[in-house]
Image (spheres, grey):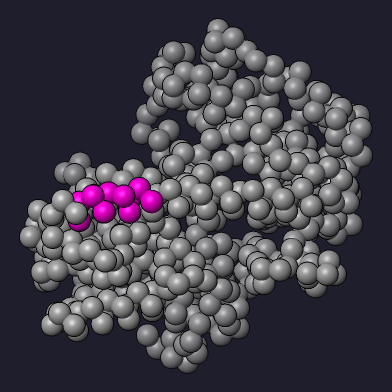
Amino acid sequence: MSTDHQKYSTENQSDAIRKYAEERGFELVRSYADAGKSGLRIEGREALQQLIQDVQDGTADFEVILVYDVSRWGRFQDADESAYYEYICRRANKQVEYCAEQFENDGGPVATIVKSVKRAMAGEYSRELSNKVFIGQCRLIERGFRQGGAAGFGLRRVLLDERGEVKAELKRGEHKSLQTDRVILVPGPDAEVRTVRWIYSRFLKHGRSESEIAAELNERGILTDLGRAWTRATVHQILTNEKYIGNNVYNRRSFKLKQKRVANGPEMWIRSEGAFEAIVEPKQFQKVQAIIAARNRRFSDDEMLERLTRLFQRHGYISGLVIDEADGMPSSGAYAHRFGSLIRAYSLVGFTPDRDYHYIEVNRMLRLFHGDEVERVICEITRLGGTVSRNPATDLLTINGEFTASVVVAHCRETSAGGLRWKIRFDTGLAPDITIAIRMERTNTAALDYYLLPQFEMRIKPLRLAEENGLMLDAFRFETLDFFFDMARRVPVSEVTPW
């Protein structure tokens, strides 16, 4: 199921499946449930993936797979994908039966035709729903309400009730709980507002570049809204985002039906001008945009490669981070788009990335991944009714005021023999009660699994893991963090620390 507010709750589906099994004399031996997950793609549906894996590995200890109805198998945009996963099961002699459908899934022509129609209808339902949701979000944007995303430096999110009266300021990680509530942006603390205006002044009146402004901010000890040092990119974001002149802009990027993320042209943006209180004069903002537009004119292929060559000669190596932090350079994304990939652009200027370069790029991705995972832990525990406070300098989490937790990411490395190894470095200086260690999969782009490690494990520093580990460590290993979220909601610290 994709939400808690629909007839397809996991409880209702489970009851219907149980009744179906009792009527036919089946014994239920295992359940696979993707609660709160969209059925548009198999990515992210860990339970369905595990089911298919169990069937293919020959470890499935069941003969029949009971599904509530055709749409619960998935709302795949390609109906053949849904049929393919069912075929995998049938090929392994595992029959798939739909409990709430009016036909027997016996492989006959009627079942084949009806399933094909229902699969197409399930995909079409998602397309229609996506369009309705998008239209609804556009209406809210035009009315001046914020649709997701952090407020940003110098701004704050404020919750309004159905009468438009202020209820409270939303802190980072907090979300509205009532459908009738709305969110707007308001100016943040005076110090942050003055800093934003100072950034515009330094850029316009003093001709400072984004990199120079970032260096000045760091020298003054000012941190971003995430508690981090400033970079060229974070300064550039403040100089180019219309929310600082009070405009509400939406649909700059699309990820409809989870198919492909695309950047939309300005003609497709949905905007409401003057929706919020501005903290920068519109005339100032327009002057800044004119300067940036002139600086970022469309370069020819030869001009882009010439600039990349000079950057390579200056640094001795190049990476996406080096390109993005260099003044007067097109973005790394522009190089990847123009030449097919960054690697191809590098080869055209005579640069071949070595092992160390890849290590730098992987570390950059892991830093972004770590921040997203910390936010996910905070949001999930809050959604379940728990409370979380986050130290902005260390990312140490204090949960329910009772115990602390730290999130660490373990980089996956491949040995010369083809084996995989992970090294978990503990935050020993923080001494958290529990460490959430995330092992990355081979490409270091997604989580493989999670280890929940109590404080006494930190005596082994760092902890080295292989693909298969000891019994005690496996006892703390989980495919998802659902166990930890449930523990954070219910278990007092007195029951946690002896673990």
Q: Is residue 453 left or right of residue 432?
A: left
Viewer-closest of 113 and 150: 113
Residue 96 position within the rendered picture, expressed as x and y whole percent measured from the top left = 18, 63
Q: Is residue 427 visible?
A: no
Residue 222 position within the rendered picture, expressed as x and y whole percent measured from the top left = 77, 51
Which residue is at a point 61% across and 33% down the rendered structure image? 264
Give the residue at the far bottom of this rendering.
494
Q: Which residues are magenta?
A: 111-121
Q: Main secondary structure of the magenta part?
A: helix
Q: Is residue 450 visible?
A: yes
Viewer-closest of 78 and 463: 78
Viewer-closest of 351 and 203: 203
Looking at the picture, does residue 462 appear above or below residue 330?
Answer: below
Quadrant of the frame with the N terminus: bottom left
Looking at the picture, does residue 243 appear above or below residue 31?
Answer: above
Quadrant of the frame with the C terminus: bottom left
Classify residue 299 by image quadrant: top right
Residue 120 within the magenta-colored segment of the rendering = yes
